[in-house]
Image: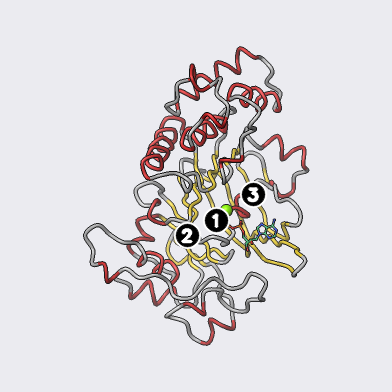
Amino acid sequence: MNLLLSVEGVRVNYRTERGEITAVRNVSFYVDKGDILGIVGESGSGKSTLAYSVLNYIKPPGKIISGSVKLEGVGDLLKLGKEDVRKVLWKEIAIVPQATQNSMNPTMDVKDHFIDTMAAHGQNDKQKILETANRLLEEVKLDPQIVLSAYPHQLSGGMKQRVLIALSLVFEPKLLILDEPTSALDVVNQRLIMDLLKALHQKMGISIIFITHDIQLIKGFANKVLILYAGKAMELGDVNEVWNTPLNPYTIALLKSIPTLHGDVNSVSGIPGSMPDPYAEITGCPFASRCKFAKPVCFEKDPDFLEYKPGHFSACHFSKDIGDNYG
Ligand SMILES: Nc1ncnc2c1ncn2[C@@H]1O[C@H](COP(=O)(O)OP(=O)(O)OP(=O)(O)O)[C@@H](O)[C@H]1O
Ligand SMILES: [Mg+2]
């Protein structure tokens, strides 16, 4: 079996003073060993919430309402207690959180970050820790001589991101989740991080979940893609298949919004309208009001996420017609 992670029907709500928000709506997806899965969605579509629910690490006012997250060799992470989840974190699955700028302690140098992280999981042998830190910093193309004694404010955004990636690998996790690792970076550093991840993926055989709001970063990098909209999984499949024969109107609209180097500028279009108010109760498909294929049924019934072709899933009442006619 090649299956590493299987996420089924995960629903996460936030209870706020204004009311309850459903941030993740019955999302299902899976990661095979060796996959690079890109998770794409607009701001507020639930990407970070989904990432943390995979780790059973949702803090109040958030709550995982239902679903399962089965990790090969471990079982359902959503059934584990806090202590057992902590054991899985870093050793089985590691996450590089969004907003790098704040995810390092400004009073600790890089060496202390390695010591702190490894000691928290039972590794106290300083020599071993330093060996690991040296090796991993070189792996992310940083000079340990310079970087180990540096404080976060002495590092550029791109360097900090690379330190965080090195830190996430200290226990050789099977799965690495990166939440918008390139959004705060310029194009050159963006490329550098992505090339680096690709090299680590090949060398270490690690599986990767790469979260981004920018669908352009996915092609040529990930082999699978999951498209989220307003907390709902809209489409999941092999990247080339989703690009060539998308089954979901939201994906089609997203792909149309990508400018190409040689394409006609006039054929590039934004998606009119905006995401639904998270406090409003949605009956039907959350994309219906912006969808040019929408019919009355779309406003009445939320479409199920179904497998239309092997490994290719979509949530749309008209995916079959779209699949038959697209292109
Ligand atoms: N702590 C919280 N309390 C209340 N609502 C929250 C909280 N965290 C997230 N939300 C809401 O949940 C929804 C999903 O948020 P989330 O941060 O997961 O989206 P995202 O896709 O990661 O967005 P971004 O691209 O901006 O990082 C949003 O409507 C957001 O306002
Ligand atoms: Mg986020």
Residue farthest toward the front in the current orientation of the protein: 153
Q: Position of residue 290 (x, y in %)?
A: 48, 77
Residue 236's label in the rendered image is 2
Q: Position of residue 149 (x, y in %)?
A: 56, 20
How far apart, in angstroms, are the residues tagged by discs 3 and 1?
15 Å
Residue 52's label in the rendered image is 3
Mark 2 is surrounded, within 10 Å at the Cα level, by few (under 14), some (14 to 19) or many (20 or more) other residues, namely many
Q: Which residue is mark 1?
A: 29
Q: Earlier in the sequence, mark 1 or mark 2?
A: 1
Three-letter amino acid code at disc 2?
Leu
Q: Quadrant of residue 105?
A: top right
Residue farthest toward the top in the current orientation of the protein: 127
Q: In the image, what residue occupies the spot 63% across and 32% down? A: 106
Residue farthest toward the left in the current orientation of the protein: 262
Regarding mark 1 in the picture, which secondary structure is present there?
strand
The foreground one among 124 and 73 is 124
Q: Earlier in the sequence, mark 2 or mark 3?
A: 3
Q: Are marks 1 and 2 in contact (CB under 8 Å)?
A: yes
